[in-house]
């Protein structure tokens, strides 16, 4: 009897391993890397993002100007489109990550973002209704010698990045030339 249950356990383990392998192969076959340029959408599920423009400036804000002698600010104009039929979408600014030519990643600068919002308002802060879109400007602070080249999104930290890579592929928005 013991021999028979051991054989069943081995069979179940083999079938499970085959099932997991098939799922992994299916995920790899369905994923695709994608990089799009200005004014082109990159889609995550029912929600799409497109870079409408990029500006590089040395200072931000009105009145009390935001300036850093060793840094430059990249202002990315981003359009968020909700292609869902029934579900609202709330954009999380912190999910946007700017990548420079050296592969270094830069997260949204809270202070720079506040300076931008002091002159333009807090756009796209609430839920975006199904079928609607909105456009906002995101502020990033980079070292003066950095050159931003891509924008990517990360909702779930490192673990979420791995899952995105495995199941959906690498998705990036090229920023184009600024000079």
Image (tube, rainbow, N blue to C red):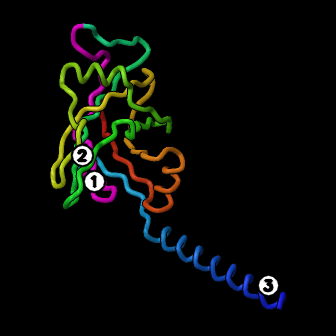
Q: Which mark is residue 6?
A: 3
Q: Which residue is mark 2?
A: 80
Separation of residues labelled 2 and 3 (CA atoms)? 55 Å
The nearer-to-camera label among 2 and 3 is 3
Q: Is residue 156 left or right of residue 119?
A: right
Of the pair 168 and 126, the residue shown nearer to us: 126
Give the class, few, some or many, for how many residues have Cα within 10 Å of label 2's Cα (few <14, many ≥20).
many
Residue range (magenta): 41-63
Of the pair 21 and 89, the residue shown nearer to us: 89
Residue at left offset 16%, top offset 55% = 131
Most extreme residue toward the front is 1
Q: In this picture, is 119 found above or below 107? A: above
Question: In the rendered structure, which disc, 3 or 1, sits on the residue that comes first in sequence?
Answer: 3
Residue at left offset 41%, top offset 18% = 71
Separation of residues labelled 1 and 2 (CA atoms)? 7 Å
Residue at left offset 42%, top offset 58% = 33
Q: Which residue is mark 1?
A: 47
Most extreme residue toward the top is 64
Q: In this picture, is 62 found above or below 25? A: above
Q: Secondary structure at mark 1?
A: strand
Q: Which mark is residue 30?
A: none
Separation of residues labelled 3 and 1 (CA atoms)? 49 Å
Question: In the rendered structure, which disc, 1 or 2, sits on the residue that comes first in sequence?
Answer: 1
Rendered location of residue 105, percent (x, y) = 47, 35
Quarter of the image containing the C terminus? top left
Q: Is residue 64 on the magenta stretch? A: no
Residue at left offset 20%, top offset 59% = 86
Rendered location of residue 115, percent (x, y) = 28, 19
Rendered location of residue 175, percent (x, y) = 32, 40
Q: Secondary structure at mark 3?
A: helix
């Amino acid at each position: 009897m013991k021999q028979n249950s051991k054989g069943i356990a081995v069979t179940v383990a083999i079938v499970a391993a085959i099932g997991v392998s098939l799922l992994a192969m299916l995920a790899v076959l369905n994923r695709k890397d994608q990089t799009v340029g200005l004014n082109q959408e990159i889609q995550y599920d029912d929600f799409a993002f497109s870079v409408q423009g990029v500006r590089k400036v040395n200072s931000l804000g009105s009145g009390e100007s935001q300036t850093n002698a060793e840094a430059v600010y990249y202002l990315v104009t981003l359009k968020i489109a909700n292609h869902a039929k029934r579900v609202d979408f709330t954009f999380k600014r912190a999910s946007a990550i700017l990548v420079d030519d050296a592969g270094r990643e830069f997260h949204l600068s809270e202070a720079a973002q506040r300076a931008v919002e002091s002159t333009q308002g807090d756009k796209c802060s609430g839920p975006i209704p199904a079928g609607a879109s909105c456009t906002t400007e995101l502020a990033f602070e980079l070292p003066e010698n950095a050159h931003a080249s891509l924008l990517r999104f990360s909702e779930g930290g490192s673990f979420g990045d791995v899952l995105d890579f495995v199941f959906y592929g690498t998705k990036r928005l090229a920023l184009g030339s600024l000079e």
